[in-house]
Image (cartoon, grey):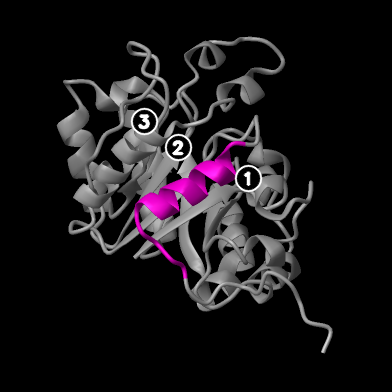
Amino acid sequence: MIRIGLTSFKEHDKLTGKKNNTLFEYAAFLPLVELDTAYYGIPRKTSVEKWIQEVPDSFRFVVKAYQGISGQGNWQDYYQSEEEMIDKFLDVMKPMIDAGKLFCFLIQFPASFKCTKESVAYLRKLHVWFKDLPVAIELRDYSWYSENYLERTHKFMRRAQFSLAIIDEPQLLNATVPRDLFVTNETFTLFRFHGRNVQGWQANDADWRKKRTLYRYSNEELEELAKEIISLKDETQDIGIIFNNNSGGDAAENALTLQHILGLKPEGLNPTQIDLF
């Protein structure tokens, strides 16, 4: 099973012609979405319940984990301990887990999370906290992929049953991560496509986030990525692909094009319009 989706469901006017889509409308076109709502703050359980009610049975969510979990927020301002933070997060997400609509949790670490003993120890704690739940790990520092550590990174991720996310981004010497086509979880694998805007990736001003993902994949690049995806389909049961290159509104069209290239025809999506009777 291969599912393709986008980061967020609201901003993709190329799907519906609207500036702001509802989740119900989005789920008429694609069977997967990455939600970053929980990254900025653990949502209410009622919000999670509403999300799962708006999508069909075949739809799945990639949930970006709360920033306190990935070391990018001051969880101490809200929780007494890491365990309390994790318990709160998993309790809120329980309706989605129980409904079978969770593709995976995405824990995206910052570039400051380097390959050190302390970082590995924290990953071990995450393995205990999340137990048998599907967790994808995005590493953003090259040290994990260096010649000295890559093999050990792979082995650790496999033992911990984490899916090491396969990332497509500009290739800057020792400053970005490679597109590492290595499956660390036989149950699921997550691809994330950030685009290949070299100049945007090097931007260091107030708009750096937007500049990074300002990129449109060409058909030739999508054909190349499709071949790599297909090459891994026998190594993992489910593949999720998220396009994050949407600063210029290109993600939706790229996703639909890749869906066509792969010959995917998602079934059981929401209707594109609601009949009055």
Whole-angstrom CA distance, mark 3 to mark 1, is 23 Å
Which residues lie in the magenta part?
250-266
Q: Name the residue that disc number 3 marks.
A: 118
Amino acid found under the numbered disc labelled 3: Glu
Question: Mark 1: which secondary structure?
Answer: helix
Q: Pointer 2 and pointer 1: residues touching (CB < 8 Å)?
A: no
Instruction: Give residue 84's position: percent from left, percent from top.
Output: 60, 56
Q: Is residue 27 above or below residue 178?
A: below
Do we see residue 80 in this rendering?
Answer: no
Q: Where's the N terminus, which quadrant?
A: bottom left
Q: Earlier in the sequence, mark 3 or mark 1?
A: 1
Crowding at dot 3, Cα within 10 Å, few <14 / some 14-19 / many 20+, comes out as few
Question: Which mark, by number, is residue 193?
Answer: 2
Instruction: Give residue 106's position: percent from left, percent from top.
Output: 48, 48
Q: Where's the C terminus, which quadrant?
A: bottom right
Q: Name the residue that disc number 1 marks.
A: 39
